[in-house]
Amino acid sequence: NYDLLNQATTLCAIEILQKERGFCISNEAINKGITKLPNCRMEQIPFPLIPKSSKSNLIYLDVAHNEEGLEALLRSLMFKHPEKKIEVVYAVAFTKDIYSCIEVLFEYCSKVSFTTSYHPKLANICQIKDSVSNFASENNLNGFEINFFENLHEAINSTIDKTTNESLVLITG
């Protein structure tokens, strides 16, 4: 669980700050800080906010943006929901190793909807398609559903509308 690893790292840093730098951090502040996750960190959307068109009641948001974060996130979701398939809406920055991220996605997911948005650092659909094509030429992608969307809204809506109760939806990147 990557949150436990993050918490352990935080506790080590706090210990250094307290012992070597004289910081005074209360146990209450430490407990409050390490138990509260920031927004979009394996954040489950509350059921009442999920659209009625969705057949899945599990929709997660996360800001995983590189292969290590993506793999830790997907492992955590598989551990938490071993009976569910993972369907992903994914956007990636062109500065990241897109090929390695694709490799992780296809190791853990049953369906990936690649998309982009207005952010200037995001890879465009052509860049993503090239990386997926390179990956596909070296790997067997039978059984995987791959979609490409120029529009983030369409990617999210299509994925949510087509998912089943056997799956969870992850929106990340």
Image (spheres, helix red, strand yellow):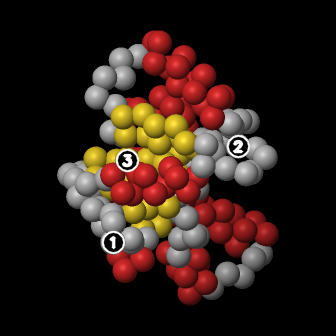
Q: Residues within 10 Å of mark 3 (few under 14, many from 20)?
A: many
Quadrant showing the N terminus: bottom left
Q: Which residue is mark 3?
A: 87
Q: Which residue is mark 2?
A: 122
* Kind of residue sitting beneath label 1: Lys
* Kind of residue sitting beneath label 3: Glu
- Between 9 and 36, the one lying in front of the other is 36
Residue 21 % position (x, y): 79, 69
Residue shown at 75%/77% (left/top)? 23
Q: CA distance from mark 2 to mark 3?
A: 20 Å
Vertical comparison of 78 with 145: above or below: below
Q: Is residue 95 visible?
A: yes
Residue 82 % position (x, y): 24, 51
- Between 14 and 116, the one lying in front of the other is 116
Q: Is residue 139 left or right of residue 129?
A: left
Residue shown at 28%/47% (left/top)? 85
Image-quadrant location for residue 111: top left
